[in-house]
Image (cartoon, grey):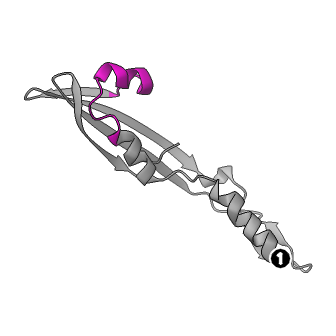
Amino acid sequence: MKKFLLFGLIMCSACTVPTEVDYMRNVKAWVGHTPAELITQWGEPTQVISDQGKQYYIYMVNKNVGLNEVTAYGGINEENAVYPLQNPQVYNTNLFCQTTFVVQDEEITDWSFNGNDCVAR
């Protein structure tokens, strides 16, 4: 059993889970690049705002996800087996991420992001 557990831990160490920290590293790496390079990789921004010699390239991702897309489980029948709920409640949640790159003199100088779905993919 210990060998199986150790093997599982070693194999899972190769697994990656998207995190906000990884997203921050990805976004931060764009400092020093040009807006043209950014657009080549990220596509056209959702919005560009110019203010006092700076441009703000804003990327917005917004999606509504319903938990009805997965099967809900609960309860135990006479055979002690977990079974799908017959009428699970459906919950919807909005996932979004707004990422802003600050551009000055044709160079990305700063960045910020906000949202509940800002994770590296």
Q: Quadrant of residue 29?
A: top left
SS for dot 1: loop
Residue visible at 69% across and 65% down in the picture: 9
- Farthest residue, direction right: 79
Of 12 and 67, nearer the camera is 12
| Residue 106 coordinates in the image, percent (x, y) | 21, 21
Query: The magenta stretch spans which residues?
Result: 28-46
- Farthest residue, direction left: 52
Q: In the rendered image, which quarter contains the N terminus?
A: bottom right
Of 47 and 14, nearer the camera is 14
Residue visible at 35% across and 33% down in the picture: 59
Is 112 left or right of 24, judged from the image as shown? left
Q: Quadrant of residue 12?
A: bottom right
Of 76 and 38, nearer the camera is 38
Residue visible at 53% across and 42% down in the picture: 121
Residue visible at 45% across and 49% down in the picture: 22
Q: Is residue 32 magenta?
A: yes
| Residue 18 coordinates in the image, percent (x, y) | 53, 50
Is 48 left or right of 16, judged from the image as shown? left
Q: Would you place residue 77 above or below residue 119 in this image?
A: below
In the picture of the structure, the residue carrying the numbered disc 1 is 1
